[in-house]
Each structure stands twice: as C-alpha cells, then as structure tokens.
C-alpha cells in the first residue's frame, strides 16, 4: 500500500501545460471525457494519477506532429518534462498492465503534438514479482569463460540463406578464430531452409568439438523466436545439445513471452531489439530505451542490444551510451537485486571503438560484437578477433590507440582498414 | 516452395531511390554492410529480398526525421512507395519472425529519413499455420444474440478505482439499460483494488441474473491482460462463470501471447490496441493499421479497436474507416478462411455517428461503443442505448438523422445533447 509507479514524459502542447498534462493523468487513471457517476473525490484521491513535477522547456512555432488540437489562435507549442505517478494498486506489479498504463492510450491524446516516455521508476513490488535476468553479467562471464575483457562476439552472415551445415562451417571458422560469442541473425530462426533443431545440432557438434580441444566453449545465441510452445521446446533442445545461450527478438515475443521463457530457461537470454527504430526515430513520439529496457530486464533479458558507437544506423553515440549505462545500473537497491543486463554493442563495430567505448562507459562488462570488423580483417578472422582483444587490453591499461598500434600488427592493420 | 511475403513501404531518402531501397532489401535478407564469404549469387537469388515495385512520389527540401545520412550537397529528400518481397523460406509461416523481417532492423537504416510499413500480403501458408479468430463477426453475433444491428457497447467508467461490487453495480445499471456489450477499461485487469476473479464473479452474478430474466446475456469483455499462465487461468474463470468474452491489450501481450491465448480460448477475444499512437502518430515513421491488424487477426483477434468517426483522439476519419474496412476484408480467399474481425468503434461516440459510419463503411458488422453517449444521455442510459439503436435502424433503412429525430425522442435528445 502507498507504493507508486513514476513515469517521466517529454510533451509538446498548444494548450496550457498543466491542463494538458492533467488530461493525460486523468485519461490514464480514473478520469474520462465526460463526468460519470461514481467518479467521487474519494475515488480520484485513491486511484487518480498525480502530477509530481512539471518543468517547462522551450517552445516552437509549429506542432511537431499533425493531428493534435489547439486552442483558437494558438501561436506557440510549449514543451515540458512531466513526471506523473500512479498508485501501484491501479495495476499491481504486472509488466503488461504497467505498459497499458504508462505507454497505452496516451500517445494519441489530442492535447499533444509530441509525447515521449523518457523514464520509469518502479516500486520494489516489481522486483519481487519478476525474476529479472538469471545470468546477467557475472553468469554470462562464467559460462563464456571470459573474466575481464568484453566478450568478443560476432554474427553469422549472410543473415539468411545458409543451411545448418553451412552455418556450422561458419561457426567452425569463427571458433577457430577465437571468438567468445556468436549469434544467429534475427532473420534466422526456424525457416524451412535452416530448421532450428538441425542448426542447433550442427552448430553444437562444432562448438563441442572445439571445447574438447581447447577447454573453451563458444557461447552461441540460438534465435528461438517463435510461438510460446516452440520457444520453450527450442530452449530445451539447445540445453540438451550443450548450448549456453538462446536469443529472442523482444518485439516479436512480447513481455509475457519473455517472462515465460525466462521462468523456463536455464540459459542466458540474448535479447534483440529489432524494431526499436519505431520507438526511437522520431524526436516527437516514442519511448526512450532508458525506460524501455527496464521492462525487459525485469522480464528476464540477460543481454540487451544497445547499438554501438559510430554505428551504421541513425542513433547518436550519446544515446547508445545512455542505454548501455542504464543496462548496468541497478534497478533496485540491494545486492543481487539490480537486474543488471550485459549491453551488446554492435553495428559497424571493429577494434577501434574499444577506446572510447571504455572511456565513456567506464566498464568492460559488455559484448563487443563485430561482423566485418572480424571477418573482413585483412589478416583473417583470427587477426580480427586479436585486434579487438588488443584494443581492449590497451584501453583497460589506459593506453591509446596509437600505443596499441605501435605494438600489435593486428590492431595496426585493423586501424588501417577500418579506421577513419 | 516459391511462395513469397510482400510488404509495401513509404520511404523518404536523400540517396538515389533504388539504391536506398536495395539497402533495405539487402539488410533484411542476405545482405550485410561488408561483403562476406558465403554470400554467393546462388544464395542471393534464393534468399535475397526482391524489389517488386518502386513508385516515386513527391520530394521535400528537408528530411522528415533527424539522424539519416545524405550524400554531399543533398538538396532533396525523395519519397516513394516500395513493394519488397521475401521468400517464405526465409522465415517460414511464423508471425514473430515475419515481424522481425518486415518491421525489424529497418526503421533505423541510415538511408531513410522516413519509413512506414503500409501493407502486407501473406501467402496461404500463414492461414494454414494460424488459427485466426474463432468467433469473428458471426460467432460474436450469435453469442451476443444480436442479428442485424451493430452491438451497442459501453465501457466501465471510472476506468480504475471501482471495487468488484461497484463494477457489478455499474454493470447492473447498464444491463438494465439494454446494452449488448460492456468492456473493462484497459487500465483495469487484476489490480489489488479490483482483483480479476472477484470482478468476474460479481459481474457474472449480475449478468446471469439479467439473462435469466430477459433471456439475453450481455457480453462482457473481461480484461485478462497479464502473464501467460495468468491469462489462460483467467480465461477459464470467465468461461466457468458463464462469461462470453475476454479482452487483451495487444501490445502488452505480444503476438505469441495472443496466439497462445487463442489456441486455448473458447471465448471471443476482444483486442485492445492501446499504445497504437506509437505506430501511427508520426507521418514519417511507423506502421499502418491496415498492415498491423492482419497480424493480430491471424493470431486470433475476434474484435479489433479502430477508434471512431469524430473521435477524441488524433486520428482522422479516413484512417478509421480504412482500418475498419480492412478488418472486414478477407485475408485469404475461400469461405470461412478470411479471418475477418469485428471492428470496434469507440471514443467520442454517440448515436449520431451511426449514419456516416454506415454510409462510409457499408456495413453494420461492428461494435458501436459509447461511454458518455450512453451514460450521459439526459434521459438516462436506457435512452442512450435506445438512441443508438434508433439511429442504426434509421441508417440501415436509408433514412437521415433528421427523419429519425422527428420520430424518436431519445435520438432527438441525443442530437440536442451531443450533436454539433
């Protein structure tokens, strides 16, 4: 009792700010467009959403999004940050119902020509109701046998079109090159051309053989995205074959899907955020990953994609770093209850990003995934992997890219090939 | 073999159009940023996405979204409609994996300053793999005992804060007023203040009592949104209590969640699209509901929210009608295999919209849900319900609002109270 959920929004409106935000708070709790019987002051006091803070920002001369209303002769669309809180009793500690409250029927409200969910603060009841990641940073490091450096990862390419045996052959080359981590592409799950079970069997034969020789088992994230029963069955197949990771596309499986997978899973869950552009591309509508990843961590994501510095997509470096920092920031106080997830840096990555990624993140608890940065290294994949490890060793020792290039041929070649 | 998935996009780019769309097709199939071994011409021919059509539209002098790249001295951002196809073999008939292909890592591509998914065409393999709605229009009409007119629906308000007994008391008044359909608010699922099971028991006592007296059982959509196991258990509770409908928030439960619910369910599934504004508010990024609702119909939605004419949200009437028409358009040829869902018109609705909704949709196969339009009718809820039925009877008989107002006091009062 008394616990509340807090959400912070960026809003833009032609109406008086407080009036517009009050409409949002009303619509998302006990209010309605028309006064109805039963909406007593006591009920509003008990169940109504509350405006905790309203900070006015800038103003613009035109609405950012079409469709919003405006008072007659409106000349200014004002922007603000608004923190709103709800009694936990409205929805209980339930992620799917939290979503309907903090990111439901509010993006369409006529009051707003812009609305973004920036952040969430959840009461500890959510921590008690949800499992969070089973492995997180520490468990992933243990399973992958990587103590200190980031996991050096890569992805199977071409994304689709390889048979299970061709996939296994690619894994064979990458494992021989020394990678710690390999993932399926998000386009490859259980297509008729590369059935999941056959891929698991073929790939794990190769990985297990390497592990017998070297003592090191490459972590392969098998993309088990599918229907509920398929996902649980596929997880078991990976587990039985000796695999150490499964992957799911978050927006494809949904929150209850991920939670059910997590409750069943005995392996780390590598969470792919494809589709994220829908939430992030417009500055005027969407959800911040700082808020979004909290839901998926509670549901059980062990690894979360955050894009990478100087990536090939549209996201700015500051946004990538904010996401990664948030993944590593405890959601709740108390040892082992922070639900930290391992951020996955990918897209356009090679050895060179190690220096500024480390300097700006202040951590090496991440997966550094490179495609071309490994397989297109002129010295071959082994040199590509080596160049990334050299860069991170250097970064952790406080040395510069120039220092490392002077010392290591593999990194020097990477710099010449992929550098600016 | 040979079957393909087709998706149509609206795109905006500063790059040569064909080159930009080719990047999308490559990224979402066998291509990658850097040429990799194994990407043979045979593999590309077999697994690559294909550009089926590229229709240039207008051009603008500034990018609609920030973050996109542009060639040096770009002065024009050109827009086009692009149809792209994929071999079904890339993903198989799997909705979660279809989503990662047609609405995955493409919204963030640097080539585009705008990208919207407009439509989808799916091969019949999806029809064979998915159940579709179990009840649809015909089954809903049968369960609700409404043969010809739209179901006259309403929603429990205040949205949250009522106890189970207070909810049941509201249902008692609304059932006495003669409504066909009542739904929980999407904010109300299983909060500690109004637990699901107690609400079902209290509400069904009232509904069953009315049904014994009148022979008509009001259809109540109980919002069972939650975790997978909770949803299935809650469904069973509704079924055992004699209920005839369950409701789920689509974006909260995800595609595998809805499919699993549908495979278990013996009741119509009322699908709430809260959060839809995220996909629809920006003209530059998002997904059309014409495309989106196809996925949810395949997964099993019987009723789909489409907003309403002259609604209180930001959506234009043309968009509402396009969505509703699409829900009633068969997805596949062949009797009983069209997966048609019943569109739910709501938001700012009263009797008056019956005339143009019917004229422009050409159908009465819908749920016409009014809140204030029923409970705030000056003659009371019974008059509110009567006014909506009078309007639809008139509309179906080809009469005008003026005709109906001249004849029926309830509709006349509604017109005076809610009309323009």
Image: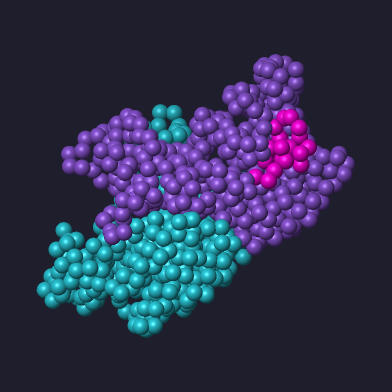
Chain colours: A cyan, B purple
Q: Percent x, y for residue A208?
A: 42, 78
User: What residue do we see at 68% from left, 22% from top?
Assistant: B395
**Residue A95's quadrant in the figure?**
bottom right
Position of B76 relative to A273 (above/below): above
Q: Quadrant of residue A369?
A: bottom left
At 57% across and 38% down in the image, what residue appears? B331
| Whether residue B48 is visible | yes
Residue A267 percent across, percent down from the top left: 49, 73
Number of numbered discs: 0
Magenta stretch holds residue B152: yes
Q: Which residue is depicted at the point 70% across and 43% down?
A: B135
B311 displayed left or right of A80: right
A249 or B230: nearer the viewer: A249
Report if residue A83 lies within the magenta region. no
Image check: A292 left or right of B108? right
Bounds of the magenta span?
A: B133-155
């Amino acid at each position: 009792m008394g616990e509340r959920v807090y959400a912070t929004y960026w809003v833009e409106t032609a109406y008086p700010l407080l009036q517009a935000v009050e409409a949002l708070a009303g619509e998302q709790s006990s209010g309605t467009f028309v006064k109805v019987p039963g909406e007593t002051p006591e009920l509003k006091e008990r169940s109504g959403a509350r405006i905790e803070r309203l900070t006015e920002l800038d103003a613009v001369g035109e609405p950012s999004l079409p469709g919003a209303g405006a008072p007659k002769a409106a000349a200014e669309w004002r922007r603000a940050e608004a923190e709103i809180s709800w009694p936990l009793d409205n929805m209980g500690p339930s992620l799917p119902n939290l979503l309907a409250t903090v990111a439901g029927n509010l993006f369409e409200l006529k009051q707003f020509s812009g609305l973004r969910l920036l952040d969430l603060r959840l009461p500890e009841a959510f921590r008690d109701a949800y499992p969070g990641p089973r492995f997180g940073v520490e468990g992933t490091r243990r399973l992958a046998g990587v103590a200190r450096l980031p996991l050096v990862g890569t992805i199977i390419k071409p994304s689709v079109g390889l048979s299970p045996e061709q996939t296994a052959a690619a894994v064979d080359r990458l494992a021989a090159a020394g990678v710690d981590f390999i993932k399926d592409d998000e386009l490859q799950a259980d297509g008729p051309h590369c059935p999941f079970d056959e891929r698991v069997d073929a790939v794990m034969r190769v990985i297990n053989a390497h592990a017998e020789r070297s003592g090191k088992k490459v972590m392969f994230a098998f993309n088990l995205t599918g229907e509920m029963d398929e996902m649980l069955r596929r997880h078991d197949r990976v587990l039985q074959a000796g695999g150490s990771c499964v992957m799911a596309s978050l927006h494809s499986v949904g929150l209850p899907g991920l939670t059910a997978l997590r409750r069943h899973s005995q392996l780390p869950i590598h969470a792919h955020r494809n589709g994220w552009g829908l939430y992030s591309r417009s500055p005027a509508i969407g959800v911040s990953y700082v808020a979004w990843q909290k839901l998926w961590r509670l549901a059980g994501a062990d690894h979360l994609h955050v894009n990478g510095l100087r990536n090939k997509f549209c996201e700015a470096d500051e946004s990538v770093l904010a996401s990664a920092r948030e993944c590593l920031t405890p959601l709740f106080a108390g040892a082992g209850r922070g639900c930290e997830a391992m951020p996955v840096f990918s897209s356009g990555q090679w050895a060179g990003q190690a220096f500024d990624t480390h300097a700006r993140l202040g951590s090496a608890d991440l997966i550094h995934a490179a495609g071309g940065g490994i397989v297109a290294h002129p010295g071959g994949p082994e040199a590509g992997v080596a160049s990334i490890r050299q860069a991170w060793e250097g970064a952790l020792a406080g040395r510069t890219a120039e220092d490392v290039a002077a010392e290591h041929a593999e990194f020097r070649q990477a710099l010449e090939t992929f550098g600016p």
